[in-house]
Amino acid sequence: MRAVRVHDYGRPPSIDDVAEPELQGALDVLVEVNAAGVCRTDLHIIEGQWAEKNDVQLPYTIGHENAGTVLETGSAVSNLAPGDTVILHPLATCGLCRACRAGDDVHCENSMFPGMDSDGGMAERMRTNVRACVKLAPGLAPTDVAALADAGLTAYHAVRKALPLLYPGTHVVVIGAGGLGHIGLQALAALTTAEITVIDPAEEARRVAAELGAHHTVPADGSQVDRVLEITSGQGAHVVLDFVGENGTETQGVAMTRDAGSYFVIGYGGRVDIPTIDIVSREINVVGNLVGTYNDLDELMVLAARGDVRLRSTIYPLDAALDALHDLDQGRLPGGRAILEPVPRKRVGDTSG
């Protein structure tokens, strides 16, 4: 089968012919990958930013936002059958450690993270386990939801954590309305009554944000902190969700947060540098966010099935994977996601192939 493989950090991956994965355990599931999201984390992997954390042996297949069709299941799998369409939680977890038993499976002590520390889904087939599989509702196609497996899940997880802080009358700022931010914005609009301000440098992204429920849109032109303070009567936002996390948004995000407010870090690449006296005197919170739980993904699929959360995406064939990565790197996907289609899923009535 064909797969997108990283051979050396700092160099573009290649599309190789590799052996197909096989079941290794009773809870394993083999999936035909009908859609694989292209994420900025993939760029960071290629750059080598995750090399020490993952300690993965090169070459390996990237791709951690995956959806497709079940091909084969292990002997202990009873809730899935070949032909089922699924979206895959990024982590294949054990279900036995304390974190898993508490429902905090993102911190599983024995997890596998396909596309990060093992072969992922930018390939025609991949191996995961049954605990990672969420069945798709009728009418949801893998290409409709693949990027929700990580980008959407991460955005939803942050919004879900912020919900107790966003009671009626509060204000939330979304920094970055791109691949993650436009999903987080939709989750906010679906789940809260908070007033929403979106900051993004791209006029098109701001236009889309207004259509998706933003009450205010502000260009990232250097005046965004002042604009947010103006909108919030000089107080700042109760919650700031930073979907960028680099190139100055870290400082701006903290400056937009009101006293006793919370700054959520979702995007990464930069540094948060706050004098401890400011943290104490202003009593602000800095909140990290890592992917999300299985239940988060299940809830997100409910919103997707209802049409409350939709992806804006551009579809690429697997052979154009390098083009998709380049377009993402060059900012050619404003307000949307790139989706690879390794094995196009046949539609009802399609007898070709």
Image (cartoon, helix red, strand yellow):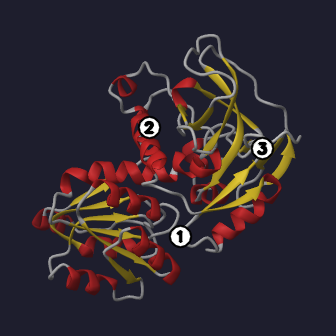
Kindly state the secondary structure of the residue where label 1 is placed: loop
Q: Is residue 101 left or right of residue 129?
A: left
Query: Which amino acid type is shown beneath numbered disc 1?
Result: Gly
The picture places residue 311, in percent across and down from the top left corner, at 54, 58
Outermost residue, left side:
281
Q: Which residue is mark 1?
A: 335
Q: Nearer the viewer, residue 127 or 190?
A: 190
Which label is found at residue 211? none
Q: Earlier in the sequence, mark 2 or mark 1?
A: 2
Q: Is residue 6 left or right of residue 86?
A: right
Q: Quadrant of residue 293?
A: top left
Give the distance between the C-alpha atoms of the residues marked 2 and 1, in whole angstroms. Answer: 24 Å
Q: Which residue is mark 3?
A: 343
Q: Is residue 167 left or right of residue 4?
A: left
Query: Which amino acid type is shown beneath numbered disc 3?
Result: Val
Give the distance between the C-alpha atoms of the residues marked 2 and 3, in whole angstroms. Answer: 24 Å
Query: Which amino acid type is shown beneath numbered disc 2?
Result: Asp
User: How busy is the neighbourhood of tag 3: few (under 14 within 10 Å), some, or many (20 plus)?
Assistant: some
The picture places residue 134, in percent across and down from the top left corner, at 52, 33
Name the image quarter holding the N terminus.
Answer: top right
Rendered view: 197 above or below 5: below
